[in-house]
Amino acid sequence: MIDARAVISPQAEIASNVAVGAFSIIGPDVAIGSGTWIGPHVVINGPTRIGIDNKIFQFASLGDAPQDKKYRGERTRLEIGDRNVFREFVTVNRGTTHDKGVTKIGNDNLLMAYAHVAHDCCVGDKIVMSNCATLGGHVELADWVIMGGFSAVHQFTKIGVHCFIANNTAVTRDVPPYIMAVGQPAVPHSVNSEGLKRRGFTEDQIRNIRRAYRLLYRSGLKLQVALDELDKIAVTQAEIRPFVEFIKLSSRSIVR
């Protein structure tokens, strides 16, 4: 299942049923789990750990050195979970010592052609990064985020669960859960209600989230006053709690 024209380091750990295509290069200190398929002309450098049943298409580059001028060759790593798909020309870099030293990709994600995940990013589960979507360093994407084509996220920015980032959007501040963000720079447009429906949220839950959105963005209240009101609502409406906690923990301020 490994093409004779692939170049694989003796120090790489590859499960017995991993497929590797022609002219792919796998460096030392790379571990690849069972069922993973690697197409031709892929480059994977370590330290990198890749889980099971991933698909890595041609010309992808995973685990190479961070694109950070402060990087001096320190030992950092990339960790990738299970059942992810990395399409053509996707690039994912290792972490730096200026953060936790690791870039993390969760499970069941789809990174379309030319998507880029920079050093020290933390990507959750079931995320879609469309063509040419880009994450700067130290970005955090929560589960179920969808990024449209050519969208980009500024360094140290966080995007909450179930968000939708429209195509060509430039995210420079944190985006709370459930929100559809658009524009350059990004502004809140609406609740990602269609995505919530697809993921099993009830009509009542979506209605409650819309009310929370209006309270935060359409009521004219100052942020802290709106947050206090949302905190009270979240006592009986559990779906509002992630919204409230995200805003409390935001370090870059939220899109407004």
Image (spheres, helix red, strand yellow):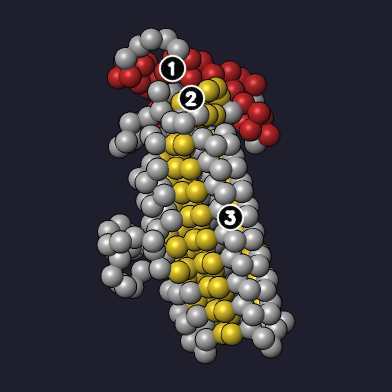
Count of picture labels: 3
Q: Give the residue at mark 1.
A: 217
* Secondary structure type for disc 3: loop
Q: State whether residue 208 appears in this view.
A: no
- Of the 4 image quadrants, the one containing the C terminus is top left
Cβ atoms at labels 1 and 2 below 8 Å apart: yes
Q: Is residue 231 left or right of residue 205?
A: left
Q: Earlier in the sequence, mark 2 or mark 3?
A: 3
Would you place residue 49 above or below residue 122 in this image? below
Residue, far top: 220
Q: Give the residue at mark 2.
A: 188
Residue 15 in picture, x, y percent from top left? 61, 79
Residue, far right: 1
Q: Residues within 10 Å of mark 3 (few under 14, many from 20)?
A: many
- Of the 4 image quadrants, the one containing the N terminus is bottom right
* Secondary structure type for disc 2: strand
* Secondary structure type for disc 1: helix
Q: Give the residue at mark 3.
A: 114
Q: Earlier in the sequence, mark 1 or mark 3?
A: 3
Residue 68 placement: quadrant:
bottom left
Cβ atoms at labels 1 and 3 below 8 Å apart: no
Cα–Cα span, label 2 and label 3: 26 Å
Would you place residue 119 above or below residue 74 in this image? above
Foreground mark, 2 or 3? 3
